[in-house]
Amino acid sequence: KSLTTIMNKCTEAEYRFGTTGTLDGALTHELVLQGLFGKVHRVTSTRALQDNDTLAKLNIRRIVLTYDEKIRKEFGKQSYQDEIKHIVEFDKRNKFIRNLTIDLRGNTLVLYNYVEKHGKPLYNLIKDKADDKRKVFFVSGNTATSDREAIRGIVEKQKNAIIVASLGTFSTGINIRNLHNIVFASPSKSQIRVLQSIGRGLRKTDDGKHTTLYDIVDDISWKSRKNFGVLHADERLRIYGREKFNHRTFNVNL
């Protein structure tokens, strides 16, 4: 909307250039942009930039958490909000994410969506179990910009720090040079949000290590009924396929 307002007022602009690494794939979005700037030109792809060593290599590990048969059977067809509430408050799931995060070596970014319901409990679980020497940071929309920048600066000098951050604050506009792992703790199907979150880990690290993304998938399906978590994960899988990202799927019984 802001872009449309600005461009519509630039009546005397002879040349218009708009650059982005992420189009959301929606036809409406693309048509609006074409109206403002002209035809969309795709000059390169993330995969091509990885292949020519401009960006860090990315490995995606899809971890499908299969819920207990009793839970899946009784879950029924729930609304998206009810399912999300169940997922983010599920103790076994949060402990799995905690254990995964603590086991990872290198600087790790854990991305969540809901501050009070999910972000803070996850942060407390991780902080309580992490080694005392390991720095663990919490970032939400309430964190001052100067503090976010300070945290980013500290992490770039660390080798084993953990940042538990909201998608809104750390999916875009933040560059962390030494990021080795990203954990998607909250499900999302937005192409822009997924690609921008991945973008946090594509800056090459000082040690030359690859970046690994851990995509948590919640399988509460029963027979032919698929839950939102699985449907959204399928959408992310299509994004990974389109972008030609390396990905593997692992199944874990919760």
Image (tube, rainbow, N blue to C red):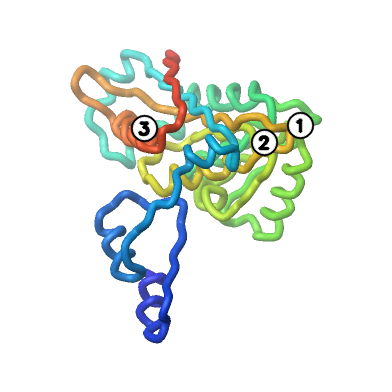
Viewer-closest of 94 and 59: 59
User: Marks 1 and 2, Cα distance to the nearest angstrom?
Assistant: 8 Å
Q: Which residue is mark 3?
A: 241
Characterize the local packing of mark 1: few (<14), some (14-19) or many (20 or more) Cα atoms within 10 angstroms. Answer: some
Characterize the local packing of mark 2: few (<14), some (14-19) or many (20 or more) Cα atoms within 10 angstroms. Answer: many
Determine the image quadrant of residue 2: bottom left
How many numbered circles are shown? 3
Q: Which residue is mark 2?
A: 162
Coordinates of residue 233 in the picture (x, y in percent): 35, 32
Viewport quadrant of the C terminus:
top left
Check disc 1 and give the amino acid type.
Arg
Looking at marks 3 and 1 on the same chain, the residue that comes earlier in the sequence is marked by: 1
Can residue 253 be seen here?
yes
Instruction: For the residues labelled 3 and 2, say whether their Cβ atoms are less than 8 Å apart.
Output: no
- The residue under the point 66% across, 29% down is 209
Coordinates of residue 159 in the picture (x, y in percent): 75, 33
Instruction: For the residues labelled 1 and 2, say whether their Cβ atoms are less than 8 Å apart.
Output: yes
Q: Is residue 155 above or below residue 160?
A: below
- The residue under the point 35% across, 79% down is 8
Taking 189 as reference, is 167 left or right?
Answer: right
Taking 126 as reference, is 25 left or right?
Answer: left
Check disc 3 and give the amino acid type.
Gly
Viewer-closest of 93 and 245: 245
Looking at marks 1 and 2 on the same chain, the residue that comes earlier in the sequence is marked by: 1
In the orientation shown, which residue stands out farthest toward the left? 224
Viewport quadrant of the N terminus:
bottom left
Residue 134: assigned label: 1
